[in-house]
Each structure stands twice: as structure tokens, then as C-alpha cells.
Image (tube, coloured by chain):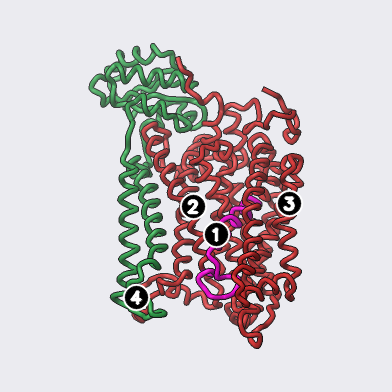
Amino acid sequence: MTSEPVYGLMAEFDNPTDLVQAAKGAFDAGYRKMDAYTPYPLEEAAEAIGSHHNRVPLITLIGAMLGMIGGYSLQYWVSVVNYPINVGGKPFHSWPAFIPVTFECAVLGASLAAVFGMLALNGLPQPYHPVFNTPGFVRASRDHFFLCIESQDPKYRQDETRRFLEKFRPLQVSEVPY
Amino acid sequence: MVQFNDPDKLPPKGVRPPVIGPGHDMGTATDRIAGIVLSKHTPLFWFAIVFLAINIVGMLNTAIAWLFMRGTGIWGINIPVGWGFAIVNFVWWIGIGHAGTLISAILLLFKQSWRTSINRFAEAMTIFAVMQAGLFPLIHTGRPWLAAYWLFPLPLTMGVWPQFRSPLIWDVFAVSTYFTVSFLFWGIGLIPDFANLRDSAKSLVVRRIYGMLAMGWRGSARHWNRYETAYLLLAGLATPLVLSVHSVVSLDFAVSVVPGWHTTFFPPYFVAGAIFSGFAMVLILAIPFRSLYNMQDFITLRHLQNCGKLMLATGSIVAYAYVLEMFIGWYSQDKYELAMVHNRLHGPYSLYYYCLVFCNIISPQSLWFNKVRSTPWMLFLLSCIVQFGMWLERFVIVVMSLQRDYLPSAWGMYWFTKWDVMTLVGTMGLFTLLFFLFIRFMPAISIFEIRALLPQSKVKES
């Protein structure tokens, strides 16, 4: 056993069923600080490690509201306050004509918020992350499935956790150095 | 499972072609698609096409440079036809872009998983088509530096602001939002595939470049969870957006009082036409792409058939709109509307109108036959005809209404010049150039979504 601190223990699987089983097992055993790494979105894996809800919808809603209010106020201020022009006898505050731009601004705000909110919550861009030190981790973006129990977890014990992960018959269990 | 050896051979009656060719697992699917990008060998036809496209872009640059030097007098526009090729091309290109968002957003919400193989390059097609479209509003005055404050609400010392009651300004917001949202949609779809390219690249430089583009994506389940939420939300936002964009474009016409333009059914008519021409463009790109790069396993006959069916459906809506256009003209009993109908059928541009009827109403009827929907070259030919017809449609709408509106003394003809044609053909070259650069440097098929479609990707219930 090494005395160097490690990021965690990584188990490698070649199919999603084994991964989900191991993730469920680890969650039931009380591990919380862990993550699964899959080559495509696997809903069951997120469920198994206890990741159900996220704040992307809320951020998107806020973005939509800001876009909507911003778009409408821009038109109101320009057409009523700063540069009022009589066009065909229409009122300065001709709100039906302001709806299309308000709608487009709301969609724009919501979309920007959804994408950049998602990236921010995920902590991306991230130039360095210890999981990339795992041997064979390049296959996480191809066809292999990984489960990492992190050393920050209160239940984490180097030997015990390794024995625990090996119960799920992974291809290999490796230490992830920082 | 039925085995197919020839990818373009139709399966027996009653069996639909598969969405992914048989015998693929996650590794082989990844290697095939990423192989186009990571391969050191660039095929000869790629150089040939890019060389040709660059030359055409040179022609575009010449035409635009001459325009900026001499002004719009080099074009065929004059009174009474002050809107010519620039707006025709704008509407045509922006319409082509619509199918990309339809495939990536609307079909996603309807859980049409076959869309997966074609959504990436359809999104790229959207972005490149909107770029061509955006070029025309910028240059159409011949004074692009003025566009800044005509189009955008900029706080300048002149204190002049855009007119927010005008559909032309709605258009600026609709098109620029559409471009941004399409770009975001395409961009977040690419992140996991860039991560795959980073991990499979052999050369250090290539790995670094794709590594930066992937932004450190590691496929974490928590990340995927947020990613999928954001992706679905974007799809939900893009769906009303795409319908709004061509509706707003149609309002540029419908809000005016020109005979033939002033109708309430323009928005749905334009949206259907946009999707019609967009699917034609998807087929024009997909059919050569799948045979040049041997991608018949991923873009199968099923995709071509489904695109054909969607073309038939949207084409029928367009045909209905043409009939309705004539009907409304007659039903209104307004003498100017009646004159417009007469001008379409018997005026100096009636040949254009009959060509349009042939291209957009008669020729798509061949799609009722499964044989046509399943034969790539027939679909390709038909798509080209439809694309030409959709360009004619915009020409007919723009020019035929303007040339004869109210006072016969103000009637006139519109003759386009070689500079008009050079600009139009030039944008096609720029589109082709961008598209082939995209195919070479980015995965043209969404790899991670293909993985999720494979049977091996499902979790087995214990």
C-alpha cells in the first residue's frame, strides 16, 4: 500500500449493466462521493450514484426572464422615451409590435443560460482532472464504463474499498493518483 | 435480424431498413466515424471539391468587392423592383437552414431516434446556410458599414434608433438569435465527440487541439445528467424559435400592402416551404456524403426514406398554399389581387411560375412511390429540382408582386445581371467550402448518440 494520497479507486467495466450494478451496490453500501464515467449519457448510472435533479432548468428560466425583460425594456425605452416617432398614428407604446423581439430575446437569454449554466455547473472548461491519470481511461469516451469511489468519501478505506469494488467483477481496479 | 450485404438493396416487403447497419459495436462505430477526422489520408475528391469551392468563393469576393466600389447599380434592381436577388437569396438560404433545427430539436422531442445519424451535419448545414443568408442583409445596400446602426440598437452619438415596429428589425433579432441558438446546439453536441477525438488521436498536436475544444469533458454521470437537461431544454427552445424565424421572414412581406404579399397565411406557408427546401438540402448533402465516405451503415435507406416522406408531407402543405394563394386572390374579388393572379398565369414571368409548379408540386408526387424514396440517385435528382423550385418560389413572390402593383404607369421589368448570379453562385461555393472543411475536421455524425442507439448500450434488467 502506498502512502501517497490518491484521488480514489477506479473500477473499469466493459458493459453498462455491470457498471450500474456496481454503482447501485456502492450507493447502498453508503458511499456518496463517487462518480460514474460513461461514453454516452446513461440515465441509470446517474440515478444509481444519487444524481437526480440539477439546477439547469432554474438557470434557464432565469435567463429567459432576463432576456424577456431586457428585450421589452429596450424597445420601450427606445420607442417611448428616447426616440419617439409617430408611425402611421400608432401609439408610441405599441406593445403588440414589440412581442416578436421580446420573444426572440427570451429564447436567446434562455439558450445562453442553459448552455453556459450547464458548463459552469459542470466546472468546464477544466484543464486538468486526476481521473485522466487512470490507466486505460481513454476508453471512457469510447466503449468502457468506469466507476470511481473518491478518497474524500468518509467510508473510503484503501483496502476495504478495493475489495468491495472487486466483488462486482470489474476488468480491473486501479488507483487514481492526483 | 435480416442481413443486408448491399447497403442500398431494399429489404423484403414489410421489413424496414435498419437505422444502423448490422454488426456494429461501440468501438467499430466510433472508429468508422472518427476515422474520417483522424485519418492522415485526405481523399483526392476532397481536395478537388475544396479547390473548386475556393475558386467560387473567389468569384463571390470579386462580386462583393465590385459591389462595394460601385454600389447596387451593378445589380438588376431598380424602381419598381427594388428587392431583387438579395432578398430572394436571403429567404432561400434561411429556409434551407430550417431542416437542421427541425431534425435536431423537433424530432428529438418526438423521440425519433433515427434522426441521430443525420442531426450533426444537418445542424452544420443550418449554421452555414444561415451564414450565407446573413450575408445578403449586410451587403444589400452596397454600404455594409451602415448596417451596424440600421440593424442593431447601438447607442451612437447621432441618437438614431431602429424602428421596432418594422418586421425588418424583427428579422434581425430572429435571424441572429436563430444563428446563436443553432450554434450553441451544435457546439454542445460536439463536446463529447471532441473528447473522443482527444482520446483516440495519435498525434500530440491533434490531441491538444481537440483537448482544448473538449474543454476537459470526462463523461461523468453527473455531467451527463446536466448535459441532457440542457440539451432537451435547448430543443424545447429551438422548436418555437425555428417556427418563429421564417414566420418573421414572411412578415417582411405580409405586413406590406403589395398585392400578393398582404395575406395572413404567409407565416405557415413560409415555414412549410422552408422545411421542404431544408430536407431537400439534407438529402443533397447526405447522399454524396454517405457514398463518398462509405457511411451507408449509419445513413441507411431508412434515413433517406424518412427524409423523402417528410419532403412529401411539407411539399403537400406548400402545394396547398399555392392553391390557396390563387383562391384568396379570386375570393377577395379585389381587382389588384385578381390582376396579380392573372399576372402569375399570363404575365411576362409566367414561365417562372409554371416551372415552380412543376418543381414544387408535380415532381415531389413521385415520392409516393417507395422505389423513388429508396433510390439515392432519384432522391438526389429530385432534391435538386425541389431546391431550384424553392428558389423560383421566392423569385416569383418577390419580383412578380413588385413589378406590377397598382398603377400600370409604374409597372416595369426586372432583369438580373451577371453580378447577381455571381453572388448567388458564390454563396453556394462558400457553403460547400465550409461544409467540406467541417466534414474533414469535425465528426459529421454524432458518435456518442450513435453509441446510445446500439443494443449493447442498454442496461439489462436483472
- Quick one: label 3 or label 1, which is nearer the N terminus? 1
Q: Which residue is mark 4?
A: A91
Q: Is residue B159 visible?
A: yes
Q: Which residue is mark 3?
A: B382
Using the image, determine if residue B438 lies above or below residue B225: below
**Neighbours of disc 3 within 10 Å: few (<14), some (14-19), many (20+):** many
The span from disc 1 to disc 4 (Cα, nearest Å) is 34 Å
Mark 4: amino acid:
Pro
**Neighbours of disc 4 within 10 Å: few (<14), some (14-19), many (20+):** few
Quick check: marks 4 and 3 in contact, CB under 8 Å? no
Dot 4: element:
loop
Closer to the eye: label 2 or 3: 3
Name chain A's colour. Answer: green
**Neighbours of disc 1 within 10 Å: few (<14), some (14-19), many (20+):** many
The span from disc 4 to disc 3 (Cα, nearest Å) is 50 Å
Mark 1: amino acid:
Val
In the image as oriented, which residue stretches furthest toward the left?
A154
The stretch of residues the image draws in magenta is B252-280
Mark 3: amino acid:
Leu
Numbered circle sitting on residue B130: 1
Dot 1: element:
helix
Quick check: marks 1 and 4 in contact, CB under 8 Å? no
Chain rendered red: B
For image coordinates 63% across by 77% down, the residue present is B335
Residue B181, x across and y down, in percent = 45, 53
Q: Which residue is mark 2?
A: B182
